[in-house]
Amino acid sequence: MVILKLAYRNLKGAGIRTWLNVFVLSLAFLSIIYLKGMYNGMQDQSIRISEDTDLGSGQYWCEVYDPYDPLSLPDAHSIIPEVFDPLINAGVMTPVMLYQGAIYPDNRLKNVMLRGVDPSQGVMNLPTAELVVESNGFLPIMLGHRMAKSINVTVGDVFTLQWRDGNGTYDARDAQVVYVMSTQNATIDIGSVYVNLALLQDITRLENEATMLVVDKYYSGELPESTWKYQSLFALTKSIREMVEMKSAGGSIMYGVLMALALLAVFDTQVLSIWRRRQEMGTLMALGMTRTTLIKLFTLEGAMYGFFAAVLATLYGGPLLYLNSIKGLTIPMDMDNFGIVLPQTLFPAYSVGLIVGTIIIVLITVTITSFIPVRKLAKLKPTDALRGKMS
C-alpha cells in the first residue's frame, strides 16, 4: 500500500507529462474498442440480414447446385423430394428455383438470375406476395431497387425476358415490373429477377422442381434425411466471417501503430524518470528500500498510466461509444452496390468481453514496457545514486 501511494504521488507530481501519456493511451483504448466493435457489429448485422432475407436457419441444395460453379447452374434443379412435403405444407420450408435468363431493357442485353419463389411463402422476409398482381397478360416480375436502378426501369415498365427451357429450347415473353422492393441484402438484389415459382416451373417445363429449400430461421425441429445436401447457417455465412476477419486484420494495423506510439511515450518517460530521479532513488535505498522494491515502484508507476488511461477513456469515450451504438455509422449510398450483405447504417457491437479484454491487454503491455527500462536498477548502488551516477 505504501508503494501504491508513493507511485500515485510521483505520477501526480509529474504534472502535464503524466496526463499527456494517459491521454495518448486512452486514444489507443478507444481506437481498439471502436474498430473491434464496428467489425463485430458489421458481422452480426450481415449475418442477421442474410438469415432474414435469404438463408433462413439453413438450406437444402439439390445434388448438382454449386454457387461457386456457374457452369453447373443450367442443371442445378431437380424434383423436390417428397420427404420435404410436410415441412413445405406447414410453412417452415419454401422452395426456390435459380435459373439463368436474359432481359432486354431499352434493347440492351443483360444476363440475369431468375429466382422462382412462392408468393405465399413466409420463410424469407421478402414481399413475394406482390408477384400475384395482374400484369395485363405480361409475365409479372419483381426487382430489387439496386437492380431497377442499374437497368433504369420502374414499376409498370415492360421489356423482353428470354430463357432456355428444360428441353434446351429458347423461349421469350414480355415481362412487366409489378414491384420494386428495397432490401439491405445486395446479393439477392443485383442481377436478380423474381418470378412466381409455379409460373417459372411452367414456362421452363420443370414441374415440381427447385434448386434449393430454405428452412425458416425460427424452426428448431428435426430435419429429414435426403439426397439433397443440407447447408447450415454457419456454413452459409462463412464468407461473411472471413470478410470481417480480413477487414479486422487490416484495421489492427492502425490501432497497432497508435499503441506503439503510446507505449513509446511510456518507455521514454520511464527512461527520463530514472535519469532525473537518481538522487531520489539513492535516498530511498539509503533509507532501507531494497532494489526489488524500487523496481516494483517504477514499474507500478508505468502500469498506473494504463489504469488512468482506462478511467479517462471511460469518462470521455463512454458517452461517444454509446452515442455511436445508438446512431450508428451511415455509409454513402454509392457504396451500396458492392454486391455484399452490407447495411446502409452500421451499428457497432461492444461486448463486455471486448472491453475487459482490451483493458487487460493494454495494462499488460504497458506494464511490460515500463519494466524494460527499470531492469537496470537491479545493479544500482546507493552511493552512486546519491552522487547522481548510474551503476
Image (tube, grey):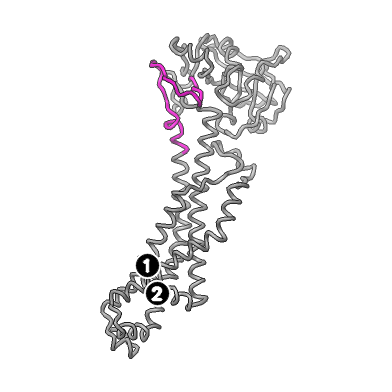
Would residue 71 be visible to someone looking at this image? no
| Residue shown at 62% from the left, 32% from the top | 183
Q: Quadrant of residue 387?
A: bottom left
- Vertical order, 243 against 366 (above or below): above
User: Is 373 placed left or right of 314 in the picture?
Assistant: left
| Residue shown at 44% from the left, 55% from the top | 358
User: What is the total number of numbered labels drawn onto the structure image?
Assistant: 2
**Residue labelled with disc 2:** 270
User: Which amino acid, by three-letter code, is at mark 1?
Assistant: Thr
Q: Which label belongs to residue 369?
A: 1
Q: Nearer the viewer, residue 144 or 71?
A: 144
Q: Which label belongs to residue 99?
A: none
User: Which amino acid, by three-letter code, is at mark 2?
Assistant: Gln
Specify few, some or many for label 2: CA neighbours under 10 Å numbering under 14, 14-19, or 20 or more. Answer: many
Q: Secondary structure at mark 1?
A: helix
Q: Nearer the viewer, residue 36 or 280?
A: 280
Residue 214: in magenta span? yes
Would residue 51 be visible to someone looking at this image? yes
* Residue 194 in picture, x, y percent from top left: 61, 22
User: Is 37 placed left or right of 156 in the picture?
Assistant: left
* Residue 352 in picture, x, y percent from top left: 47, 49
| Residue shown at 47% from the left, 57% from the top | 255
Q: Nearer the viewer, residue 137 or 225?
A: 225
Q: Quadrant of the C terminus?
A: bottom left
Q: Nearer the viewer, residue 195 or 89?
A: 89
Q: Which residues are magenta?
A: 213-240
Residue 202: in magenta span? no
Q: Quadrant of residue 121?
A: top right
Specify few, some or many for label 1: CA neighbours under 10 Å numbering under 14, 14-19, or 20 or more. Answer: many
